[in-house]
Structures are given as C-alpha cells and as structure tokens.
Image (spheres, rainbow, N blue to C red):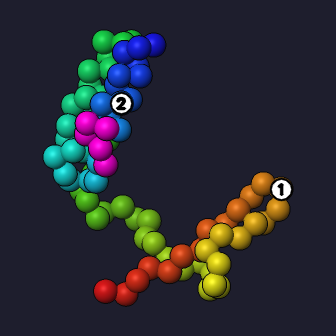
C-alpha cells in the first residue's frame, strides 16, 4: 500500500499537471509503465493533440454555471471564450 501512495504522490506532486504533449505527460507515461511491477496491466493509447472529435461547446446560457437538476444530478454550463 505504501508504494501505491508514493506513486500517487509522485504523479500529483513531483510530476504535477500533465497536459497532452508536454514533458510531464511523457514522464507520467513512463511512471505508469513501472506499475507493472505492482501487478497492474499497463496499456498506452496514443493520439495526436487536437484530433479528438469532442469540442467544447456552450450548452445553455445563464448567469450561473452550476445548475441542480435534482436527484443528485448537476449540469455545469460554460461558454468557450472567443480568442
């Protein structure tokens, strides 16, 4: 268990945020490869940055970003800034 906690700390603190295509992403991928020594099966998925089909879009206009839909469901509304 201690090794797993150390692994989590290394990812969150030492490596930090891992944006696609950055050295931190590469370092994290190499770190995940080491998890096989803990008995995990590790696979990698490669894609080029900016080629995913999902695009950020505005779902609903409104002053509040967070809407309570009831039954524990929430909807977060956002608007992508025009640059």
Residue matched to label 2: 9
Q: Tag count in the figure?
A: 2
Element assignment for label 2:
helix
63 relative position to 46: left or right: right
Residue closer to the observer: 16 or 76: 16
Compared to residue 45, the image places residue 30 above or below, namely: above
| Residue 16 shown in magenta | yes
* Image point (44%, 65%), residue name: 54
* Image point (78%, 54%), residue name: 72
Q: Is residue 36 visible?
A: yes
Quadrant of residue 25 in the image?
top left
Q: In the image, which is nearer the foreground, mark 2 or mark 1?
A: 2
Q: Which residues are magenta?
A: 13-17
60 relative position to 56: left or right: right
Q: Residues within 10 Å of mark 2 (few under 14, many from 20)?
A: few
Quadrant of residue 70 in the image?
bottom right
| Residue 68 shown in magenta | no
* Image point (61%, 68%), residue name: 76
Residue closer to the observer: 82 or 3: 3
Residue 80: x and y in percent read 44, 79
Quadrant of residue 56 in the image?
bottom left
Residue 59: x and y in percent read 59, 78
Looking at the magenta stretch, what is its main secondary structure? Answer: helix
* Image point (65%, 85%), residue name: 62
Residue matched to label 1: 71
Q: Is residue 28 visible?
A: no
Residue 83: x and y in percent read 31, 86
């Amino acid at each position: 268990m201690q090794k797993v906690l150390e692994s989590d700390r290394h990812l969150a603190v030492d490596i930090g945020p891992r944006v696609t295509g950055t050295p931190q992403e590469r370092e994290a991928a190499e770190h995940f490869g080491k998890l096989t020594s803990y008995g995990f099966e590790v696979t990698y998925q490669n894609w080029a940055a900016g080629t995913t089909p999902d695009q950020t879009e505005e779902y609903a206009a409104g002053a509040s970003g967070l809407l309570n839909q009831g039954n524990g469901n929430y909807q977060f509304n956002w608007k992508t800034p025009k640059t």
